[in-house]
Amino acid sequence: MNRDMLAAGVLLLLMVVQVTFVNRLPLPGGAVPDLVMLGVVGYALARGAREGALMGFGAGLLGDILPPVAHEMGQYALVLCLLGFVTGRWAESRPEAGLAAALGCAALGPAVAVVVGVVFGGADAGVVALAGSLPPVMLCNVLAAPVLVWTMTKVVHGRERTARPAGRLAGGRP
């Protein structure tokens, strides 16, 4: 339970960093990585589909109320919930495909956001996103995914401790 609270705190920190710093970076094409989405992907890889969907929904609801908001309330929550579930299910069915799942969901995330936006009534925004801004955002997410997903999985799992043989002192004498 403590690791889940720590992961929620990290996601909250990622939201603040996203809004205050990352969204203002002058990157080529005006594209920036979605740190919160990548954090949810890392959490879902570590915890599974159910927990990934729940964390994605909670993080998405918080993201829906943080400014600047240019979409319907609940849209980001749905996107992160779907991504958390898909990532977690992928990790549960193929545990050895962690990096592939992270990169796939990092690339898939912006496309899911466009589709959900079109479903909620923003057809014009969907056409504009598919035409020009979607590929750079997907590339930014894929480039940022390894570091952020690895960090989030380490936060959730903690340090792995190795067992030492009993009865040994530091010098190797019994």
Image: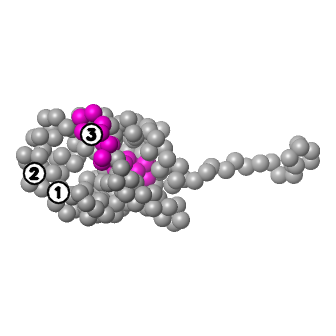
Q: Disc 3 or disc 1, which is closer to the eye?
A: 3
| Label 2 residue SS | loop
Q: Give the labeled residue for mark 1.
A: 71
Going by the numbered disc 2, the residue's amino acid type is Gly
| Label 3 residue SS | loop
Residue 95 position within the rendered picture, expressed as x and y whole percent measured from the top left: 46, 42
Q: Disc 3 or disc 2, which is closer to the eye?
A: 3
Q: Determine which of the numbered discs, if any, sits on residue 32 in the image.
A: none
Which residue occupies 15% across, 38% down?
130
Query: Within 10 angstroms of label 2, few (less than 14), some, or many (20 or more) residues?
Result: some
Residue 46 makes an appearance in the image? yes
For residue 61, side relative to residue 129 (left or right): right
Residue 75 position within the rendered picture, expressed as x and y whole percent measured from the top left: 21, 58
| Label 1 residue SS | loop
Give the prevailing secondary structure in the magenta stretch. helix
Going by the numbered disc 1, the residue's amino acid type is His
